[in-house]
Amino acid sequence: MEDNAGLSLAVVACARDAGAWRLHCAPMQLKRLCQPRNPLFWTLLVLNALSALLGWITHTYTLPGWLALVMVVFAVGNAVLGMRIAWQLVNS
């Protein structure tokens, strides 16, 4: 119990000190995702379109169990790969 209380006090102390908040808790710059000259940016867009397509297929059609499992594996892999690429773009 005391560990959680200490953690919440540290967060409150960090929030009170605006200077420390900016230094240690700086928000990510999402504008770094848009890099049209980087091939990873276009790969990310294709993966997002593929996600929409997979979602549409699984909600529109009744799929057999094995095909639904294949679609779920592709969708999860697609999401993980998309998050990894987005993280690389933000941190590059």
Image (cartoon, rainbow, N blue to C red):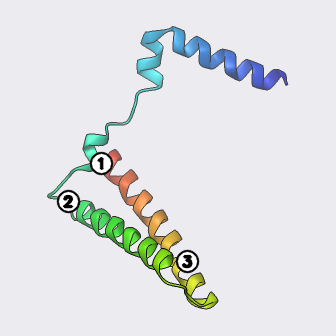
For marks 2 and 1, the one nearer the N-term is 2
Q: In this view, does 46 lie to the left or right of 77?
A: left
Q: Mark 2 points at which residue?
A: 38
Vertical placement of 77 versus 13: above or below? below
Circle 2 residues within 10 Å: few <14, some 14–19, many ≥20: few
For marks 2 and 3, the one nearer the N-term is 2
Circle 3 residues within 10 Å: few <14, some 14–19, many ≥20: few
Q: Distance between the residues labelled 2 and 3?
A: 27 Å
Q: Do the residues labelled 2 and 1 touch (CB within 8 Å)?
A: yes
How far across and how far down the image is residue 72, in percent? 55, 76
**Residue flagged by tag 2: what amino acid is it?**
Asn
Judged from the image, the secondary structure of the residue bearing numbered disc 2 is loop
Question: At 57% from the left edge and 83% from the top edge, which residue is drawn?
Answer: 68
Q: In this view, does 25 lie to the left or right of 35?
A: right
Q: Which circle, 1 or 3, is nearer the viewer?
A: 3
Judged from the image, the secondary structure of the residue bearing numbered disc 3 is helix
Vertical placement of 74 versus 51: above or below? below
How far across and how far down the image is residue 50, in percent? 36, 73
Q: Name the residue under label 3.
A: 73
Q: Which circle, 2 or 3, is nearer the viewer?
A: 3
How far across and how far down the image is residue 66, in percent? 61, 90
**Residue flagged by tag 3: what amino acid is it?**
Val
Question: 89 or 42, which is in the foreground?
Answer: 42
Q: Distance between the residues labelled 1 and 3?
A: 28 Å
Disc marking residue 92: 1
The residue at the far left in this view is: 37
Which quadrant holds residue 1?
top right
Question: At 50% from the left edge and 77% from the top edge, which residue is drawn?
Answer: 58
Judged from the image, the secondary structure of the residue bearing numbered disc 1 is loop
**Residue flagged by tag 1: what amino acid is it?**
Ser
The residue at the far right in this view is: 1
